[in-house]
Amino acid sequence: MEFIKKDISDGVELVGAPVDRFKTNLITVRLALPLEKDKVSANAVMLGLLARRGKRYPDMLSLNRKLASLYGATLGDTVSKIGECQVLSLGATCLNDKFSLDGESIAFECVKLLSSLVFEPKLDENGNFYDEDIEAEKRILIEKINSEENEKRIYVLRKTEEKMFSNEPYSINKYGSVKDVEALSKEDVKNAWTNALSKAKILVTVVGNTDIDNVYNHLLNEFKNIKRDYTPLPKPVFVGRSEKVNNYLERIDVKQGKLVLGFRTDVKPRDNLAKAMRSFTDIFGGGPYSKLFANVREKMSLCYYCSARYTRLKSCILVQCGCLEENMDKAVNEILHQLDVIKNGDYEEEFNSSKMALTDAVGSVCDMPETIENWYIQQICDERYKTPQEVCDDINNVKYDEIKECANLVSLDTVYKLVGQEEE
């Protein structure tokens, strides 16, 4: 699946994936900013303000009427962390243009709606967001932060990142903290908006069958009025090896213990071996054929689940397990033993299974508008966008011995155990 890329302004890009086989089109505006502790909460609140009201649609009722007139289009907003950047997303899903009754382009109308929400928010006579709107968005954001804390699998992952990357931007929660949100002033939120329009890397993706040139010309016109002061996104802090293993134990009221192992990988994001590191991680703890699944979970029954995820932009691998407290040390030892097995070159069966599974997974990106859109978003911090086919070629070109090479560049940094309260 090919894509069309057009540069609109400094640090502003349009990526179109022209496909006509879906019932829906998907248009998303993404703003990527450096992760900064004193700004993440203001950015997240600001996104909520843009997503639920605007100058032309001052309340949910008028905005919903507009969406209903666009054949029931929907809006969605998300905050994510990619590399050492906070990425704010505002997207619209709408009916494929070929289903419109009067030949209008529904997708193009959604582009106009999104740009009106982003460029013309609902502001008072002094040019600030309204207090009651800010308070409403603060409440929503605090609920999101609390719900992440209640979801222990996410909670323990965040705690591991906090500890493992304590002196690096990556340790910052994408939403900030409840305390940060409560302390926000209207000036903070207004500054977040003006700063994002001026300095963020902005990526607009259009997946579907609408005319990309129309979208390009419209955005070109909109950005004429914006004074851009773009500086390229920061490169992630690189720490290739850990000097020692840091162990953490936290006791809270949980039924099922959680165990996370954080590994550093001595491979920079753009190194050639980064392609092989993806395959190594899959062999180590990816699918049901992986070393961790087959041995730690199935054979030895030490965990309810056990999987590894490679974060290329941060040069790290996080292994997550659901585990009883009494099995945790055994699980850690077995995970490290399986790493040694790969270092010794014993992974022939997994190597072949992994190639098939990874290329299938990447190939299936083109099956849904959401996965196509997400594919390009995940590359927002990269210098160029790769198609799924290019990545499939990368996977197929990984050599057997490169897996062993990768295993020898992996070192354990952090072990975080989240366990239940001790019995009285």
Image (cartoon, grey):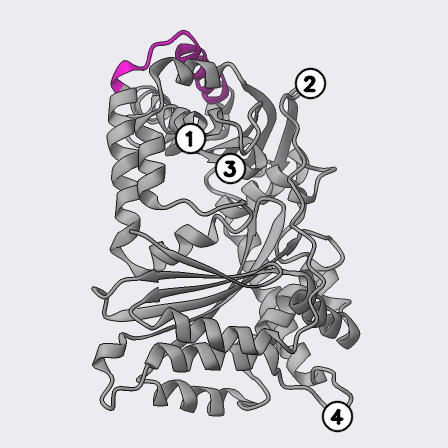
> Is residue 317 on the magenta stretch?
no
Residue under label 3 = 311
Residue under label 1 = 278
The amino acid pointed to by label 4 is Glu
Residue farthest to the top?
344
Mark 1 residue crowding within 10 angstroms, few (<14) / some (14–19) / many (20+): many
Residue under label 4 = 125
Q: Which image quarter: residue 284?
A: top left
Residue under the point 38% across and 13% down: 401
The amino acid pointed to by label 3 is Thr
In primary-sequence order, the first of circles 3 and 2 is 2
Q: Nearer the viewer, mark 3 or mark 2?
A: 3
Residue 19 screen position, x and y as percent: 27, 62
Q: Which image quarter: residue 24?
A: bottom left
Placement of 181 over or under 320, stated as above or below: below
Tell me the SS state at disc 3: strand
Residue 276 screen position, x and y as percent: 42, 25
The amino acid pointed to by label 1 is Arg
Residue 369 placement, left or right of 383:
left
